[in-house]
Amino acid sequence: MTSRLFSPLVLLLVLAFLIGPFAIIIAASLSAGETLAFPPQGLSLRWVFKVFEIESFRQSFGISLFLAIGGTLTALILGVPASYALSRYKVPGAETIRTIVSSPIIVPGIIVGLALLRYFVVPFNTGILFALFMAHTALILPYAVRVVSASLTNLRSDIEEAAVLLGSSRVGAFFRVVLPNIRGGILAAFILGFVTSFNQVPVSLFLSGPGIRTLPIDMLAYMEITYDPSVAALSALLAFMSLGIVFLAERFLGFSRYV
């Protein structure tokens, strides 16, 4: 009897540990008080509406959206051909190349951000927005390569060879046969890259500048001078946005097959 209750109890504790912080943030965002507090001081949606009135949040949201979409698309443009080459050809040092490509997610983000600032932005006087774009692209590239490679591994190579034998060129076979069959993996890589970029903090912290900050960095700066529940409201909205994107990806793409 005890062993039957142990597993459900552990599962319940794990769920409480994972969901608890989200529940606290959501409750704090609905507070009617003037300061961020839990338990909330009454219930109100005033701070949720205030989020849309803060100019810096709107501006930084646009920058984060640009970086997430642009960086992910660029990473896919680079990652899809790289994944195809690593999956279909005997590339010398393929494992070493995979390790190098994966290095942005292996190395701590703080080190990546500091290195880019010291050896890329400062010496070459690179613009902050361009540096952020390059950094986010580099951070997303490993996810693009890994997810697309998984899709290519599950796609039989003889289908492509049959298209070539029937008269198609290699490039034509890629666009007509391979690409349509791995579009689910590409979309999954896009969603994973988008969420990763949008919520990125360590690298963005080092590469932010006057007037150019991503939304997470702007939220940190806002909390340094204001301690009202609007940051909790924005955090809750972002959490729901990320969960909604992942839920839709799982519902229509089978997201768990690729990651």
Image (tube, grey):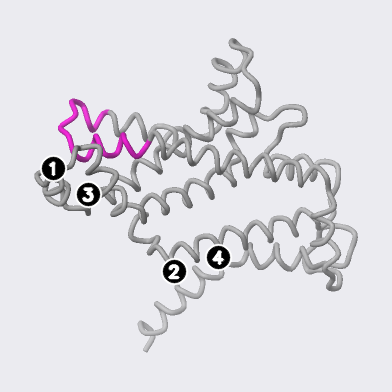
Q: How crowded is mark 2: few (under 14 residues within 10 Å), some or many (20 or more)?
A: few
Upstream in sequence: badge 1 or badge 2: 1
Give the mark nearer the N terminus: 4 vs 3. Answer: 4
Q: How far apart are marks 4 and 2 (CA)?
A: 25 Å
Label 1 belongs to which residue?
167
Marks 2 and 3, how far apart in space? 22 Å
- For marks 1 and 4, the one nearer the N-term is 4
Query: Would residue 92 be counted in the magenta stretch?
Result: yes
Q: Horizontal and vertical percent for residue 51? A: 80, 55
Q: Name the residue under label 4.
A: 17
Q: Nearer the viewer, residue 107 or 209?
A: 209
Crowding at mark 3 (Cα within 10 Å: few <14, some 14-19, many 20+): some
Residue 246 higher or lower than 11, as above or below: above
Q: In this view, does 222 lie to the left or right of 67?
A: right
User: Which numbered tag is attached to residue 251?
Assistant: 2
Q: Report the span colored magenta.
A: 79-96
Residue displayed at 74% across by 45% down: 219
Which is more N-terminal, label 3 or label 1? 3
Query: Where in the figure is residue 222, as x and y percent of width and height?
Result: 80, 43
CB atoms at circles 1 and 2 under 8 Å apart? no
Q: What element carries label 3?
A: helix
Q: In which quarter of the image is the N terminus?
A: bottom left
Mark 2 secondary-structure assignment:
helix
Q: Residue sitting at 69 percent across and 65 percent down?
A: 24
Circle nearer the viewer, 1 or 3? 1
- State left or right for residue 186 relative to residue 56: left
Q: What residue type is labelled 4?
A: Phe
As for residue 196 lying within the magenta part, the answer is no
